């Protein structure tokens, strides 16, 4: 019973935590009048330099999104920009994987040259790029292509991947760089700069792709299918790698040798399009309609105020700012604190003038007289029963004795007559003990039944208190975020606050309002 009460408290605390997390993120549109964005890249040296890809165009901003200009244009039906990658040692060297091949810029996107174009549309549709010390690993709709001379010459790599569509590529920052990629049939790992690939995860619920997919088969892949897997390495923990799919997010702490599915608690939809790691090991995940942050063993939504429709890409810069690209534009969220969210002190503004939930629970228990101490006193009294004797008192009245009067004369009246004698009273007192009560007595059974009923009643009372308390905090937050012109909604919220306060008073015999008045008088 107590477990259920605590569980209810945790659930409502989680709702409150979710709401407070939403307040921590403020989203601002930085794309101007642009729309339909597919991918983002933020300069690792200067966060104000941002690249954004949309169908047919690659845009660049040098002032954090205030002004955008086109730096690359593609023509034709297939003109998507699918991945943007900057060289780790030379951030001015930027690559753009597009539906018309791979482009490269040596001067931070000012001038571009195409360095790869496939033999057909499927090979030309580049989806991902991995940059190594002496190798470029290019993922396409028709498998992997590699270059060992900075993109001058390319050859197709068939070891383990063959003609599968590649979704994305990532690598660790350790000395012996490990490459990971996601493809149609699962997650692959390479320890030798992409020469050979080992499949480290396969979803057996998915149908294995054919070994010799034709161009027509690949061209029928939907956009959702093409974004089915996404794999990424935690740069702060090189052994930690995660991937997302339509089945959720999986995590490995040993370079992909074993996997464990992460919790879905708090996610509004199971399919995660992509994710990124925060500095402290937390995870920001992007679904089709929202952004979620994983902390304290659960997911919490961070996009309540994000006015976006379909979301396509998520990236975190080196200052802790979060960027989201979607159908309606690009949005940036600047957090109040660059450190990871822990939930500490976020609710102080709403709780500083409120009695604690523990105090309210205690007041409600005392008012309803359902304290656990009451049951303890019953059991204690029952255990002492055996030491008290059973007292029995007897009382008997005896009036059978007859008195015989003999006067010695035969002439006097009332001579030789029997008379009833005086009444006598007999009484007795007896004491008895049942020593078997020292081991067990029948009162314990009755206490067990009453205890169960009392616990259920206390559980119901605490459940009501918890719901009313956290509901009132939620309404306070909603009231604070209403615009001044929303008079009708403001009146409804204020009325709701009074209603919730009255309900808490009914459960605590006025304790809640008395505590609020005490806070106001300070």
Image (spheres, rainbow, N blue to C red):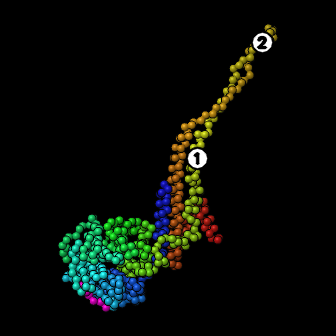
Q: Which residue is mark 2?
A: 406
Q: On the rendered structure, is 272 left or right of 385?
A: left
| The quadrant where residue 367 appears | bottom right
Q: Is residue 115 magenta?
A: yes
Closer to the camera in the image, 408 or 384: 384
Highlighted range, magenta: 111-116
Rendered position, 243 above or below 358: below
Label 2 SS: loop
Q: Residue 417 location, x and y as percent?
A: 75, 13
Q: Give the CA distance from mark 2 to mark 1.
A: 68 Å
The residue drawn where x is 51% and y is 59% is 463
Quadrant for residue 511, please give it: bottom right
Q: Residue 300: image x %, image y %? A: 43, 70
User: Quick check: 42 above or below 233?
Assistant: below
Magenta span: predominant SS is: strand
Q: Which mark is residue 348?
A: none
Residue plotted at (40% across, 89% down): 62
Q: Nearer the viewer, mark 2 or mark 1?
A: 1
* Residue 137 appears in view: yes
Task: Locate the C terminus by quadrant.
Answer: bottom right
For marks 2 and 1 on the same chain, the one whose residue lies earlier in the sequence: 1
The residue located at (36%, 73%) in the rendering is: 238
Position of 22 with respect to 103 (left or right) is: right
In the rendered image, residue 67, in percent from the top left (x then y), is placed at: 40, 89
Q: Classify mark 1: helix, strand or loop.
A: helix
Q: Residue under label 1, please give it.
A: 380
Taking depth in this image into account, of 438 and 248 the one nearest to the observer is 438
């Amino acid at each position: 019973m107590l477990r259920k009460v605590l569980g209810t408290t945790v659930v409502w605390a989680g709702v409150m935590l979710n709401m407070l997390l939403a307040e921590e993120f403020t989203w601002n549109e930085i794309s101007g009048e642009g729309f339909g964005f597919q991918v983002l890249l933020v300069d690792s040296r200067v966060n104000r330099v941002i690249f954004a890809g949309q169908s047919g165009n690659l845009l660049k901003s040098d002032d954090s999104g205030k002004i955008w200009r086109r730096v690359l244009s593609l023509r034709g039906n297939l003109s998507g920009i699918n991945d943007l990658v900057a060289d780790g040692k030379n951030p001015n060297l930027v690559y753009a994987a597009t539906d018309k091949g791979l482009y490269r810029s040596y001067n931070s996107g000012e001038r571009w040259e195409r360095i790869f174009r496939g033999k057909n549309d499927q090979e030309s549709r580049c989806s991902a790029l991995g940059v190594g010390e002496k190798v470029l690993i290019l993922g396409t709709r028709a498998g992997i292509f590699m270059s060992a001379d900075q993109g001058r010459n390319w050859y197709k790599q068939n070891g383990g991947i063959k003609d599968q569509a590649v979704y994305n590529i990532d690598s660790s920052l350790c000395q012996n760089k490990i490459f990971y990629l996601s493809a149609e049939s699962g997650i692959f790992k390479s320890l030798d700069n992409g020469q050979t690939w080992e499949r480290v995860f396969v979803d057996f619920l998915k149908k294995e792709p054919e070994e010799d997919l034709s161009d027509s088969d690949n061209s029928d892949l939907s956009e959702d299918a093409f974004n089915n897997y996404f794999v990424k390495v935690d740069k702060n923990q090189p052994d930690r790698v995660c991937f997302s799919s339509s089945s959720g997010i999986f995590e490995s702490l040993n370079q992909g040798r074993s996997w464990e599915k992460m919790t879905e608690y708090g996610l509004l939809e199971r399919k995660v399009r992509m994710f990124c790691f925060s500095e402290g090991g937390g995870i920001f995940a992007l679904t089709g309609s929202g952004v979620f942050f994983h902390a304290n063993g659960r997911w919490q939504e961070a996009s309540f105020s994000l006015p976006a429709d379909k979301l396509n890409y998520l990236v975190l810069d080196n200052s802790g700012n979060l960027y989201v690209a979607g159908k309606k534009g690009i949005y940036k969220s600047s957090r109040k604190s660059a450190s990871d969210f822990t939930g500490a002190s976020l609710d102080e503004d709403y709780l500083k003038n409120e009695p604690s939930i523990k105090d309210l629970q205690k007041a409600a228990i005392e008012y309803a007289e359902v304290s656990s101490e009451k049951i303890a006193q019953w059991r204690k009294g029952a255990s002492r029963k055996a030491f008290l004797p059973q007292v029995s008192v007897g009382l008997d009245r005896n009036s059978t004795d007859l008195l015989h009067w003999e006067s010695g004369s035969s002439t006097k009246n009332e001579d030789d007559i029997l008379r009833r004698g005086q009444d006598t009273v007999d009484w007795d007192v007896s004491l008895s003990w049942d020593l078997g009560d020292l081991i067990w007595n029948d009162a314990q059974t009755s206490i067990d039944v009453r205890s169960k009923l009392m616990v259920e009643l206390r559980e119901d009372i605490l459940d009501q208190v918890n719901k009313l308390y956290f509901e009132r905090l939620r309404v306070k937050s909603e009231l604070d975020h209403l615009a001044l012109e929303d008079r009708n909604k403001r009146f409804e919220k204020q009325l709701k606050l009074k209603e919730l306060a009255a309900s808490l008073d009914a459960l605590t015999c006025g304790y809640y309002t008395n505590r609020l008045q005490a806070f106001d008088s300070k």
